Amino acid sequence: MENQVFDAVSISTFEVSGTIHIGDESLFAKCTCRLFESFGIPCRHIICYLTLNTISTLPEQLVCNRWRAIQKNRPTTSTNTTDYKDTGNLRPLLNQLISLAGDSEAKIIYARKILEGGIKSLTDNQTGSENAKLPRSITRFNDSIPKVIDVGNPEVARTKGCGNGGRPSKKSDRFISKRMLNVPKQRSCSQCGMKGHDKRSCPTKDQFSQQE
């Protein structure tokens, strides 16, 4: 279907200005006043065209999902419309920008650059505020990460009370029972060095006497 242009003429006692383009694949009808693109409501120019052509039902492309009871379950039928939230005084400014752009392609491109620049600025500010909330240590480590990480085993630490010689030997007094410790030690012979007797009862006493 070729694009057709219809000029909306007078309705009742006042003149309607706007140019309606028919045949767009994404929209049933598109008007230069851009009311439908801004608020999702068909403008009076489109309604006039539908009335002149005896169309009593709005096409699916002219009904936004936000006006439906099952808006969450149905996809958007138009790629040129977006559901807007209440933004206070921003809508009049947006409408004024669209009106100033008019049909001039250069002005439309310039207005688009203004909007894109504002969106980019808001996105950068939001990203900067999120980074500012990060702990300083995290941002510091994110700045520079070494390519080679040299990590070795820690040095062996000596705990309090471990002693100088490490683990004691089994011959130490710590491993001998108290019963063995209470047994009196046998005296050694001063003559031969053997235990179990003394110098007077030493078996080698006679040998030492003969040598003398």
Image (tube, rainbow, N blue to C red):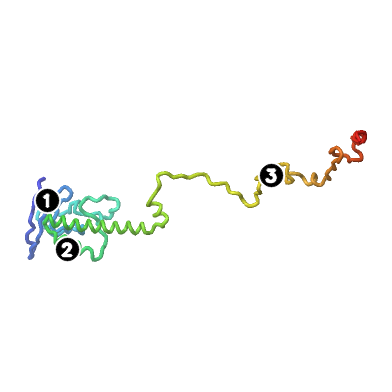
Q: Position of residue 112 (x, y in %)?
A: 19, 56
Amino acid type at mark 3: Pro
Q: Give the quadrant of the N terminus.
A: top left
Secondary structure, mark 3, is loop
Horizontal relation, residue 74 to residue 104: left or right: right
Horizontal relation, residue 64 to residue 183: left or right: left
Q: Position of residue 147 (x, y in %)?
A: 40, 44
Amino acid type at mark 1: Ile
Secondary structure, mark 2, is helix
Is residue 53 visible in the rendered structure shown here? yes
Amino acid type at mark 2: Gln
Mark 1, other Cα within 10 Å: few <14 / some 14–19 / many ≥20 = some
Cα gap from disc 2 to disc 3, whole angstroms: 92 Å
Quick one: 159 or 62, which is closer to the camera?
A: 159
**Of callouts 2 and 3, the N-terminal one:** 2
Write down the residue under mark 2. Answer: 96
Q: Give the quadrant of the C terminus.
A: top right
**Of callouts 1 and 2, the N-terminal one:** 1
Write down the residue under mark 3. Answer: 168
Residue 48 falls in image quadrant: bottom left
Is residue 203 visible in the rendered structure shown here? no
Q: Position of residue 2 (x, y in %)?
A: 9, 46
Q: Nearer the viewer, mark 1 or mark 2?
A: 2
Quick one: 8 or 200, which is closer to the camera?
A: 200
Q: Nearer the viewer, mark 2 or mark 3?
A: 3
CB contact under 8 Å: marks 2 and 3: no
Horizontal relation, residue 96 to residue 88: left or right: left
Write down the residue under mark 1. Answer: 22
**Of callouts 1 and 3, the N-terminal one:** 1
Cα gap from disc 1 to disc 3, whole angstroms: 99 Å
Secondary structure, mark 1, is strand
